Amino acid sequence: TFYSCISGVKYLDECPLEPRIPIYHLVGGCFGALKIALALWRTIQLRHQESVDNLYEAVGSERGLTTRTYRSMNILLSLFLLTWHILGSVWVMGIWKPRFKPLLHRPNQWCERSLYFFSIAVIVGVYALMVLVLMGFCCLSLVYRSSTARRRANR
């Protein structure tokens, strides 16, 4: 995420064919870093509490409000990042195989090679991670269902 943010700044004017690609990296990287910072803050906050049971007892108190606020912010950030990633995918794939050097008669029809290939790598990596997480949930679901079926059969 940090490298994505930095590459967005570094190559801000280096893709005139699709100027939203560096902005995709800049915004996505910064908001991704914010999401990571919030997760770290939340982990530190939970470690300072006496126990996890106190968190559930505190639902009506100020700590419960903090928990709800964190969940809401986490959901909103996740939805924003997912939407932003889909938009970035459309922008990057929309210029499939661009020219990597400007031509004299078409000076705005190119995109920096490293920015473009980094964009492809980020997009493919995120979708691959999503598929792996989905497959993990499916496997866990199957294990849970089979263990539940065994318990019912043993009764």
Image: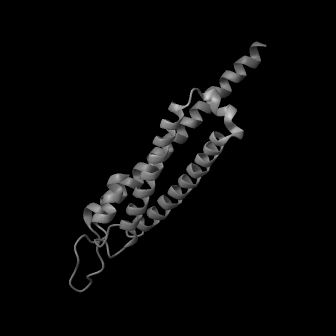
Q: Quick check: 49 left or right of 4?
A: right
Q: Residue at x 63, y 33 (%)?
A: 55
Task: Identify which residue, 142 or 119, lies in the foreground.
Answer: 119
Q: Quick check: 38 left or right of 70?
A: left
Q: Quadrant of the C terminus?
A: top right
**Picture layout, residue 20 above or below residue 122:** below
Q: Residue at x 49, y 61 (%)?
A: 84
**Picture layout, residue 23 above or below residue 75:** below
Q: Residue at x 50, y 56 (%)?
A: 81
Question: Which residue is the extreme one toward the top?
Answer: 154
Q: Residue at x 75, y 16 (%)?
A: 153
Question: Which residue is the extreme one toward the right?
Answer: 155
Q: Quick check: 116 left or right of 136?
A: left
Task: Measuring from the top left, give residue 71's x and y in whole percent.
Answer: 60, 46
Task: Identify which residue, 68 or 31, lies in the foreground.
Answer: 68
Question: Which residue is the extreme one toward the front?
Answer: 62
**Picture layout, residue 51 above or below residue 130:** above
Task: Identify which residue, 42 or 115, lies in the foreground.
Answer: 42
